[in-house]
Amino acid sequence: MVQVCVNGARGAGDGAAVPLSPGDMAESAAGAVAAGASDIHVHPKSPCGDDTLSPKALTPTLEAIRARVRVPVGVTTGAWAEPDPAARLERVRSWTVLPDHASVNWHEPGAEELAAALLDRGIGVEAGIWSGTEGAARFATSPLGPRVLRVLAEVMDTSPDTAERSAHALLADLGTAHSRPVLLHGMDGGAWPVLRLAGRLGLATRIGLEDTLLLPDGELAMSNSQLVAEGLVQYRYGRRTA
């Protein structure tokens, strides 16, 4: 599986290719699916372009994307979108249109309670385990571990020289990951080395403007569809070299 991460916490300052409105997110997601993505991860935005968990932003975003594609659509629940754990729970409970899944960063305060609330609503949980945090250790002892949809092994090392090494360390920390599927991905300079590693290991991965603005040759990516198309090439290369 190759998931497209449509926009992330990026904003207008990151370039015109980053989609911020529901319509632009839907257009970008549709192009990425046509290029080969089989799952979508998106960050709904406030009118100011900030990440938000408000149903006023989430509902039109999900509806616009689902009008264009028929693959699962997931959203973020990152603490930066709503720093107070109690308020974050209330946001999730106020959703009227539900995503297929939502990512929960296990190192953030209130992660267990948030994941439980999502599961209670029938929303799949992607357990976000960031390298360099206590996420893996906390997830290892979580009673919710066996119930998550998948584990996101998120390599935060942005160096192309060391990201692969950091990925191996993160996977070692995850161990059996409660026998849940693992999606491995990197960020910025580490995005492409980690994606190729995911190919060699036969793991799911993701690519998109959240994770990198650049193609492997350093050229600026013009769209999510371009990143997905190149991501599939790089992933298959990794599989051939396994």
Image (tube, rainbow, N blue to C red):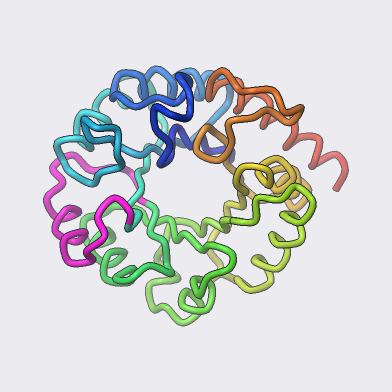
Which image quadrant: the N terminus? top right
> Looking at the image, which is closer to me, 78 or 118?
78
Query: Quick check: 240 above or below 171?
Result: above
> How many marks do you count on the picture?
0
Look at 53% across and 62% down and name the residue there. 130
Look at 27% across and 64% down and name the residue there. 114
Q: Is residue 3 left or right of residue 145?
A: right
- Asked whether 68 falls inside the magenta stretch, the response is no
Q: Is residue 30 left or right of residue 91?
A: right
Look at 11% across and 50% down and name the residue there. 94
Query: Quick check: 112 above or below 83?
Result: below
Q: Residue furthest bottom?
A: 141
The image quadrant that residue 68 belongs to is top left
Q: Is residue 89 left or right of residue 216?
A: left
- Asked whether 97 falls inside the magenta stretch, the response is yes
> Looking at the image, which is closer to me, 33 or 104?
104
| Position in image of residue 238 (x %, y %) | 80, 41
Query: Quick check: 28 above or below 232?
Result: above
Query: Quick check: 214 above or below 89?
Result: above
| Position in image of residue 98 (x %, y %) | 23, 43
| Position in image of residue 136 (x %, y %) | 53, 72
For the record, the magenta segment spans 80-102
> Looking at the image, which is closer to me, 161 or 228?
161
Q: Residue furthest right?
A: 241
The image quadrant that residue 170 belongs to is bottom right
| Position in image of residue 78 (x %, y %) | 35, 54
